[in-house]
Image: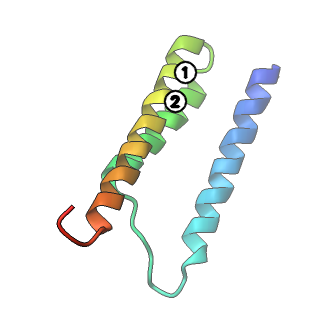
Amino acid sequence: METSQVYIAISIIVLVIVALFVAFRSGNGDRRKLTPLAGLAFGFVVAGLFCSDNRVVGYSLIGVGITLSVIDIIVKFRGNRGGNG
């Protein structure tokens, strides 16, 4: 196994652990559902991890995923604010 493959495997394991932690953390029924935009962003990041053979494609997919997640955060922030702004 090459060094980059080890990093990818570690990243995927960490993502799975975080996902399981988030899934089991809110066991009281007050779960926040993943928005479609956040799910798409997560998919792009994972696809970028799998496409690490071609760095340009891999980094581009990860960049798109991060950009979509930031857009999702901004949309949620603006939607939760009160007032006229």
Please give the name of the residue rendered at 45% of the width and 40% of the height, measured from the top-left corner.
43
At numbered mark 2, what does the secondary structure look like: helix, strand or loop?
helix
Q: Position of residue 9 (x, y in %)?
A: 72, 36
Q: Which residue is mark 2?
A: 62
Determine crowd level at label 2: few under 14, some 14-19, many 20+ residues with C-alpha closer than 10 A: many
Please give the name of the residue rendered at 47% of the width and 44% of the height, measured from the top-left corner.
42
Q: Position of residue 15 (x, y in %)?
A: 63, 49
Q: Which mark is residue 58?
A: 1
Q: CA distance from mark 1 to mark 2?
A: 6 Å
Where the C terminus falls, by quadrant? bottom left
Q: Is residue 3 left or right of residue 62?
A: right
Q: How many numbered marks are there?
A: 2
Q: Position of residue 13 (x, y in %)?
A: 70, 47
Q: Are marks 1 and 2 in contact (CB under 8 Å)?
A: yes
Q: Identity of the amino acid at label 2?
A: Ile
Q: Is residue 72 left or right of residue 54?
A: left
Its colouring scheme is: rainbow
Q: Position of residue 59 (x, y in %)?
A: 55, 21
Q: Identity of the amino acid at label 1?
A: Gly
Please give the name of the residue rendered at 58% of the width and 27% of the height, measured from the top-left corner.
50
At numbered mark 1, what does the secondary structure look like: helix, strand or loop?
helix
Task: Residue lying at the far front in this picture: please name it.
Answer: 84
Please give the name of the residue rendered at 39% of the width and 40% of the height, measured from the top-left corner.
68
Q: In the figure, 28 relative to 60: above or below?
A: below
Q: In the figure, 42 relative to 2: above or below?
A: below
Task: Residue lying at the far left in this picture: please name it.
Answer: 84
Where the N terminus falls, by quadrant? top right
Q: Is residue 22 left or right of residue 32?
A: right
